[in-house]
Amino acid sequence: MRIIVLFFLLFSSVKAAPTLEEQLGQEAYLASVNAAIVFTSQDGLSSGVYRFTKIDTVMRMYNLPLSYHFDPLTEKTNLFMVVDMGYSDTRSDRDIQDSNGTLLHLDNRLQTYVGGIGVGLRYRATEHSDLLFGVELLYSRVGVTVREKDGLDGSDVKNFFADDFNENFSYKLFTEYAYHRDYRGYDIYTKLNYKLYKTLSKFDLTDLVQDVIGDLTSLSSQTSVASLMMGFETEPLYNYHDMSLTLEPYIKGNYIWGDLANVAHLSGYATAGLSVYWNTPKKSAYIYRYFIEPSVSKGDGLEGLNLSLGFSLDF
């Protein structure tokens, strides 16, 4: 929760005074960028709640990322495939004042559905380090509604897309360097990765901003994220027959630039999490462990809670 939905970004470059419609939709729409990309973890079902504090917007998201590693091409390389499915619900409850001084109490809601598929290459550089490169194509459908909460008859408030959803196409380029080794029974690791997201959107803005720019059918947006993650997995803390319990605490720092940073006023955030693994025999239907992973994210402009659960496969 994994696509950028930023096509309202154009409004920030319009020189004329912002219209009521711009105020209603711009911040809520843009704050939901990368809902299922930036704020997910591990490789299982993930659910999270995030608040963009500087623009008073709350995002709830659900995400299911999957990956599959193919048989080795050579002694040091193999191909892998990634699949993503996600949903996010972003809401902004705030007061808006139009050009006539009328105060409106509004409830903005944005819904995003995402699906993606990609391929990558893993290269074992040394005994303790790996390099990954890949690309992913994503498709999303986004719908926005605005409801007037009290008093007015709603004639001054437009439901931007009514019951329609706008379509977006995106690609993601990613690379990662991972270093890991055993130390006194602990599996210690460091991961450094970079991701670039580019989204193209096509739609008609005539009804929304006809007094400003007229027809417009395509927009693009771009965001980059660099992350450094450090953690370790313990030796078995509890054994039951041939199964065991292990823990993996980690911390992660993220730096963001591009459209997400500009719109959400968010340049970086930190995440702390704990994965709890129940390790099972590999013969158990290809599943070699189950996990649950709570995490907390905090930054200047962001507060978030996330819970992931799922299992790891070994084919």
Image (spheres, rainbow, N blue to C red):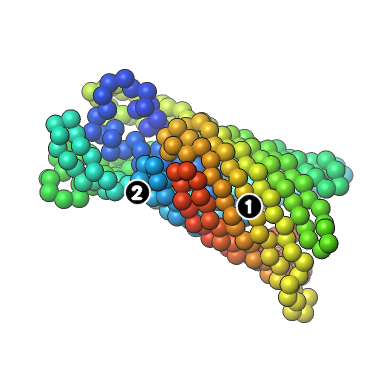
Q: What type is the residue that disc 2 sits on?
A: Arg
Identify the residue at the far front of this view. Answer: 300
- Determine whether the residue tagged by mark 2 lies in a helix, strand or loop: strand
- Residue 162, position in %: x, y? 27, 42
Which is nearer the eye, 282 or 238? 238
223 vs 77, left or right, is: left
284 vs 146, left or right, is: right
Residue at 27% from the left image edge and 28% from the top image edge: 18
Q: Quadrant of residue 284?
A: bottom right
Name the disc covering residue 251, or none: 1
- Residue 235, position in %: x, y? 77, 66
**Front label number (1 vs 2):** 1
Which is nearer the eye, 135 or 295? 295
Distance, label 1 to label 2, CA atoms, is 28 Å
Residue at 14% from the left image edge and 31% from the top image edge: 100
- Residue 118, position in %: x, y? 62, 41
Residue receiving disc 2: 91
Residue at 24% from the left image edge and 43% from the top image edge: 95
Between discs 1 and 2, the one toward the N terminus: 2
Mark 1 surroundings: few (<14), some (14-19) or many (≥20) residues within 10 A: some
Residue at 77% from the left image edge and 46% from the top image edge: 179
Can residue 42 be seen here? The reply is yes
- Residue 157, position in %: x, y? 20, 40
